[in-house]
Image: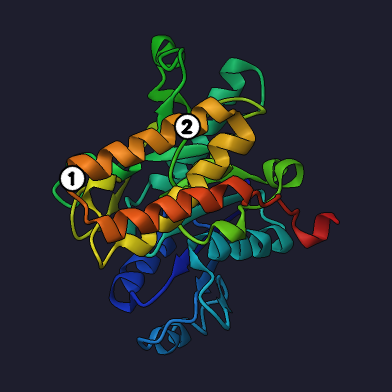
């Protein structure tokens, strides 16, 4: 049986984290390891994780500073790779997988590969919100022939990118394409990574693998909703996506993204001061172009 390392990145969500870990440890296809990356939490997460000290499956990486989701996933995936995992199953600290979510991912990926005759770089779950509807923030991007497997009777669709909320990544993808970009810190790191590894082939969304994303509100990313509390996230998002569109697509894609951002802020009546912060972030994306790194055991 393939060995799986589940990777959970957490920051100041100890109440939800316990529920996530209990769901992960109770999977029908049990992960060999559960790597928990604590991004320098200050809410007593360390005490919670200490209660799992007797469970040999749980490995805790306590970081000295908050490296964001991007840094946390990079560290956790590198650790899982080092442990010898065949697959890395990654998720946030507010993701509750159904009991068979991992089993369905592993089986769905294997079935898709056998059908198509080649390796696939990732498999992701269907992400629902707490009310049972689709989670707006976590919809993957489908390929032009997304229904190819569906037409053959499989409960799966082909995708080019997905979020880091329950995605299974095979070991070979890390060996070939490296780790997520830690410099992104937060936002678009999952998009960049799954787009990068899908250069080998499309990924697959397994429709029978379901998780619940326990977000406070069911909203997607909308630059018209910027306020003083969330602007810092949008600054990362603007810089990161502009950088990707410019350096990995073309100047027209970057310009198109910038226009959408400006239009969205105008339509949302975002204040001038906050718009200026986002414009500065877009400009920073012009020179911002981090490069992937491989897990140490590959070097």
Direction right: furthest residue: 299
Choose the circle earlier in sequence order: 2 or 1: 2
Q: Is residue 84 visible?
A: yes
The quadrant holding residue 47 is bottom left
Point 47% across, 66% down: residue:
9
Viewer-closest of 57 and 9: 9
Q: Is residue 23 visible?
A: no
Viewer-closest of 292 and 148: 292
- 118 versus 55 height, above or below: above
**Percent x, y for residue 121?**
61, 35
- Pick the quarter of the image with the C terminus: bottom right
**Percent x, y for residue 88?**
58, 52
**Percent x, y for residue 171?**
68, 46
Viewer-closest of 122 and 54: 122
Classed neighbour count for the residue bearing mark 2: other residues with Cα under 10 Å, few (<14), some (14–19), many (≥20): some
Direction top: furthest residue: 151
Specify the label residue 255 is tagged with.
Answer: 2
- 233 versus 207 height, above or below: below
Viewer-closest of 247 and 141: 247
Residue with the mark numbered 1? 268
């Amino acid at each position: 049986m393939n060995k799986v390392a589940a990777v959970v990145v957490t920051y100041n969500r100890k109440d939800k984290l316990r529920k996530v870990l209990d769901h992960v440890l109770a999977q029908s296809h049990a992960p060999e390891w559960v790597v928990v990356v604590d991004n320098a939490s200050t809410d007593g997460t360390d005490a919670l994780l200490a209660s799992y000290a007797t469970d040999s499956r749980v490995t805790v990486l306590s970081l000295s500073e908050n490296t964001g989701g991007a840094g946390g996933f990079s560290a956790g995936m590198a650790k899982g790779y080092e442990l010898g995992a065949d697959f890395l199953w990654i998720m946030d600290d507010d993701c509750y997988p159904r009991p068979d979510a991992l089993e369905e991912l592993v089986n769905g990926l294997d079935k898709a590969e056998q059908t198509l005759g080649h390796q696939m770089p990732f498999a992701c779950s269907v992400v629902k919100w707490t009310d049972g509807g689709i989670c707006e923030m976590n919809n993957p991007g489908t390929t032009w022939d997304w229904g190819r497997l569906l037409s053959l009777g499989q409960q799966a669709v082909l995708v080019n990118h997905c979020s880091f909320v329950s995605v299974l990544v095979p070991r070979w993808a890390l060996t070939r394409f490296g780790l997520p970009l830690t410099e992104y810190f937060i936002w678009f790191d999952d998009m960049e990574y799954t787009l990068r590894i899908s250069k080998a082939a499309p990924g697959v969304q397994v429709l029978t693998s379901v998780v619940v994303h326990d977000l406070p509100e069911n909203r997607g990313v909308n630059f018209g909703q910027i306020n003083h509390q969330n602007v810092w996230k949008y600054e990362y998002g603007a810089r990161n996506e502009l950088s990707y569109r410019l350096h990995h697509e073309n100047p027209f894609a970057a310009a198109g993204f910038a226009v959408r951002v400006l239009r969205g802020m105008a339509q949302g009546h975002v204040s001038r001061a906050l718009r200026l912060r986002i414009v500065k972030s877009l400009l920073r994306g012009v020179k911002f172009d981090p490069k992937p790194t491989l897990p140490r055991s590959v070097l």
